Image (cartoon, grey):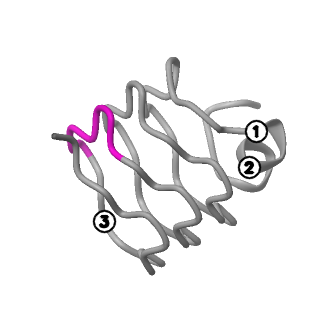
């Protein structure tokens, strides 16, 4: 089974380059965390806080529950 971080305080955590496919981040606090170059296919981000989260190079293409507002408050690849 996939890892569950539901409701966890992961603020400022380094999850860079990790494989978190299918993980549950529902309602987790990921503010200022580093998800850079990580694999998050099918991961659930519903309700997760992602202010200033580094998502550069992260594969979020099939992530679930991820909203445009979450992406906008994170730090990504977009110009």
Foreground mark, 3 or 1, reads 1
Q: CA distance from mark 3 to mark 1?
A: 22 Å
Task: Mark 3: give few (<14), some (14-19) or many (20+) Cα within 10 Å.
Answer: some
Q: Residue at x 52, y 18 (%)?
A: 61
Q: Position of residue 33 (x, y in %)?
A: 46, 66
Q: Please give the residue where the numbered disc 1 appears in the rendered image.
A: 67
Task: Give the structural element (helix, strand or loop) at label 3.
Answer: loop
Give the number of the mark in front: 2 or 3: 2
Position of residue 31 relative to residue 46, above or below, is: below
The residue shown at (42%, 36%) is 43
Residue occupied by mark 2: 70
Up the image or down, 26 lies above or below 57; here it is below
The residue that label 3 is drawn on is 14
Residue 67: image location, x then y, percent: 76, 39
Image point 80% across, 45% down: which residue? 72
Q: In the depicted view, which residue is nearer to us: 57 or 1?
A: 1
In contact (CB < 8 Å): disc 2 and disc 1: yes
Q: How many numbered tags mark residues here?
A: 3
Compare residues 52 and 61 and report the one nearer the observer: 61
Q: Residues within 10 Å of mark 2 (few under 14, many from 20)?
A: some
Start-end of magenta stretch? 17-23
Answer left or right for 79 relative to 46.
Answer: right
Q: Is residue 19 magenta?
A: yes
The outermost residue toward the top is 61
Cα separation between marks 2 and 1: 5 Å
Q: Quadrant location of residue 77?
A: top right
Which one is earlier in the sequence, the residue at label 3 or at label 1?
Answer: 3
Indicate the quadrant where residue 5 lies: bottom left
């Amino acid at each position: 089974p996939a890892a569950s971080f539901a409701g966890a305080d992961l603020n400022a955590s380094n999850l860079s380059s990790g494989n978190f496919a299918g993980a549950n981040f529902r309602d987790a606090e990921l503010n200022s965390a580093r998800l850079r170059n990580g694999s998050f296919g099918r991961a659930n981000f519903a309700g997760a806080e992602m202010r200033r989260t580094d998502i550069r190079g992260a594969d979020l293409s099939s992530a679930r529950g991820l909203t445009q507002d979450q992406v906008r408050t994170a730090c990504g690849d977009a110009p």
